[in-house]
Amino acid sequence: MRKILSFDTSCDDTAAAIVAESGEILATMIYSQVKEYEAFGGVVPEIGSRAHIEQIFPLTKALFAKAKLEPEQIDFVAATLAPGLIGPLLVGASFAKAFALARKIPFIGVHHIVGHVLAGLSEPGFPNPPFIALIASGGHSALYLCQSDYRIKLLGQTLDDAAGEAFDKIGRSLGLGYPAGKKMDELADFGDKNRFAFTIAMKNEDHLNFSFSGLKTQALNYIKKIDLNNQKDVQDICAGVREAIAQALCLRAFKALERNQLKKLVIGGGVAANSRLRECVNENSRQQKVELFLPAINLCTDNAVMIARAAIIDINQGKNTDLTMDVSANLSVEMAGGLTCD
Ligand code: KG4
Ligand code: ZN
């Protein structure tokens, strides 16, 4: 069985994995830089680049030890080339290219979003394309059509903040630190989602875009009026925000299915770990007889397994990426010999 060594360093996690060509996970590791950013309340790209440089070699060594494998047993190397923060992307991509060059094995450049879409590839219940993918993370919130040949087409996206960004910014104002999505999700379980009114932007408009900046402003205005030491107030804000974001994402995901006459939905990205969003898409899928794939939580947030799994599509099609292919911060990028996201 051929094996893929993969990396994702697009943002604030140094992630590496070894995945078999069948999609089976042989080992996966993540070094989270969250601690580095506590004082800043968000990612600082230069600090991130340095932390990736420090972590990537020891992390890879530990990964091989965990998988009980040697570098000679790797057949392909994959790494995220775009989109993301340039410095962090460069670290993972350069390390992966150097490994490929040294071992004389093919390199496959992967689009981070395609990785999120294909994170569950080869797992029981993962649909054959075509299907709709809802990807919501700290940097992106968008709907994609995964076509029969696995080419990913953008259908609609946020016009301002990403869903995760809204969670993080509101959570920060609530004093919950960074990133705040998971904490808000937990606190929301104890809150009253109806106490504070939140609007779903462009609810009745006929398109597949999102907007979360209005919701953020609404929340920040409420936060000015509440007592942050009163746990109930914080829980109620969390519940209202979680409900509005989950409903907004769910509404347009099902609109995308309807428009494309499809009955298959995949969700991904860090916000896909949100318990209310998972509940919402599950409920709607049951009612509308939609085949739903919900990845495990650790495959929703950034990881390198998803990068290897996306690379499997290229490997199956006999493609690899030239080592001169550079990293890019942009979302819309054509990757020679790689998957495209257009
Ligand atoms: O996909 P991801 O790990 O990194 C990016 O590519 O951005 O997503 C991180 C985002 C953060 O904004 C974080 O607050 C959010 O996902 N997140 C959540 C939950 N877990 C992580 N948001 C809501 N509910 C959660 N349970
Ligand atoms: Zn991501």
Image (cartoon, grey):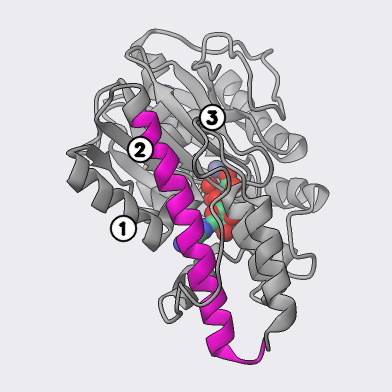
Quadrant in which ligand 2 is drawn: top right
Picture quarter with the C terminus? top right
Crowding around mark 2 (Cα neighbors within 10 Å: few <14, some 14 to 19, many 20+) is many
Residue 183, horizontal then vertical, whole percent: 53, 71
Crowding around mark 3 (Cα neighbors within 10 Å: few <14, some 14 to 19, many 20+) is some
**How many angstroms separate mark 2 from mark 3 (CA)?**
13 Å
Please give the residue where the numbered disc 1 appears in the rendered image.
Answer: 279
Foreground of the two, 174 or 341: 174
Residues rendered magenta in the picture: 228-257
- Secondary element type, mark 3: strand
Q: Can residue 4 be seen in this view?
A: no
Judge left or right: residue 289 versus residue 250: left
State yes or no: residue 336 in magenta.
no
Image point 60% across, 66% down: which residue? 180
Foreground of the two, 192 or 323: 192
Q: Can residue 288 be seen in this view?
A: yes
Q: Do the residues labelled 1 and 3 touch (CB within 8 Å)?
A: no
